[in-house]
Image: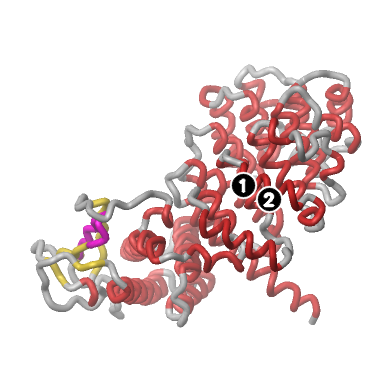
Amino acid sequence: MNRQGKAAPARRDARLELDRVITLLGSSDDRLIKNGVQAGCELIETYRARLRRSEVDAIRVALSNHLGNSDPQVRTWIYKLVAELGDGPYAPYLREQLRARDFVPTNRTWAVSALAAVSSDYKAHLQIINDELTLSYRLAAAMFAQQPDTESAVREASNSDDRLGHQWIGLLYGDMRANIRTEFVSELTSSNYPEVVEYAIWGLRKRHEGSISQVALDPENVRNATPNVRRWYYRLLLKDARNITRYDHQLRTWLEGERDSRAREGLAMGFYGIPVSPEWRELLRSWAVSERDPYVRAALTRRSDLRSATRSDAQQDVRARGRLTGYSDIRADSTDAIGQLSVRGSPGRSRRGDHRSVYKVRIYTGGSFVMHDRRNESVNVTNFGAIGSVQGAHSTLNQASEQGLIRALQELISAIRVDAAEAGSGNSELVAMVQDLHQMAHEPDRSYSWLQRIRTRLAMLSAFIGTAAVASENTDELLRNATDIIHWLL
């Protein structure tokens, strides 16, 4: 009984975090993509046993859009997520990245660590591409798979000044992949290489016994460190909620004075999941209201007690139109169309293929949009999904029209249930997935998180259909239309 009682909240937390991962990976912003891949790694590390196959497949599908990403920091985390997934078919991709595409030294070590995770002989892959087996490669290979030479590699690193090797010492220590002395990692926090300091602090934060007292930097001179070092320093300090009292003055100073976006985001992330006093809760609420950096604001509002503080009418307006929940300014006087999507009208039919004509929605950055049928006539958006009278003017994006889009989404999901059940009859897992999606779509909840959950279930269903080769082309089209509506409502 107790075991079941503990399992339910953990399962709920896993699903909520999966929603967040899929949402972030749906972005076109490299920084948000990186956060999504990083969150995907943490999700699999924390909830591996509680994730269903279809949920992991949804992560794979979302990740596939970014395998060729040009941002070095994004690629670092992509390799880590590939390693966490542990799929052998990723080996050719990793080998090609090493051969001809990724020449950033740190990234290459991460690619090697992933190769060691998805293949039985990473050294053979290195030989194929004529790459040298370096000390940092040997250390990296031990991150996700046991290696016979890890102990000797750690000894070599402790007696060398190998920057990449020392970075991997911090990583291996944090995930307890090798027998490494805490004192050695603590010494690395005074390294002349900022990257080594950053990784050492990261490693200390990962370990249960790690604390800010093990870092050579003190709160007074941390402002002279690089932004990434400050980012992880803040997160390590806030790992212990008692440090809010111990370092109250310094925290207030950083809150007011930290100007680097990534470091400030790290400070905000540090407050997630820890208890704070009423005074600090009010201070964080004021910060959330006044914060203008969207990345920092997103980190702050992971705390449930801060979400309502940032839900202004303007943000809700941007969120309703689509485009990354307020990550870009919208000019109210603009009349340029920012997008168009096609949606089937009145999709709730009991027989496949029995759907009315396709309608198009053209959305304008000024906050208005209009839907056109095949004759290019404007139709009533507020009755979207059960097409009604024709109107000739733009409709303001308001609550009524949002409800119309939600009704259209619900009808599409009803059609998906019928269509998928017919096309994939006999597949009990598919039937259960579409039934779960249908029930969720018709819940009374109409919050932003509800839309995120729907989006995640649609991604899971798409991934399952693609993997199991079930359902029809019509089901695929219905799924694409439903996903398009979600993009505009989120």
In the image shown, does 24 or 191 lie closer to the viewer?
191
Q: How is the image coloured?
A: secondary structure
Under circle 2, the secondary element is helix
Where in the figure is residue 18, as x and y percent of width and height? 57, 60
Q: Which residue is mark 1?
A: 256
Examine the structure image and report whether residue 363 is included in the region drawn in magenta.
Answer: yes
Type of amino acid under label 2: Arg
Q: What span is in magenta?
A: 359-368
What residue is shown at x 40% (from left), y 65% (from top)? 316
Q: Which mark is residue 100?
A: none
Say what secondary structure mark 1 lies in: helix
Whether residue 212 is situated above or below residue 412 in the rendered picture = above
| The N terminus - image quarter | bottom right
Which kind of residue does numbered mark 1 sit on? Glu
Q: Is residue 181 left or right of residue 312?
A: right
Residue 472 appears anywhere in the view: no
The quadrant of the picture occupied by the C terminus is bottom left
Residue at screen point 26% across, 60% down? 367
On screen, 74 above or below 12? above
* Alpha-carbon span between mark 1 and mark 2: 6 Å
Q: Which residue is mark 2?
A: 252
Specify few, some or many for label 2: CA neighbours under 10 Å numbering under 14, 14-19, or 20 or more.
Answer: some
In the picture, measured across the screen, residue 383 lies left or right of residue 116, that is left
In the figure, 370 relative to 188: above or below?
below
Which SS type dominates the magenta stretch? strand
Task: Report the front residue among 348 and 163.
Answer: 163
Q: Is residue 99 among the parts visible in the rendering?
A: yes
Q: Are marks 1 and 2 in contact (CB under 8 Å)?
A: yes
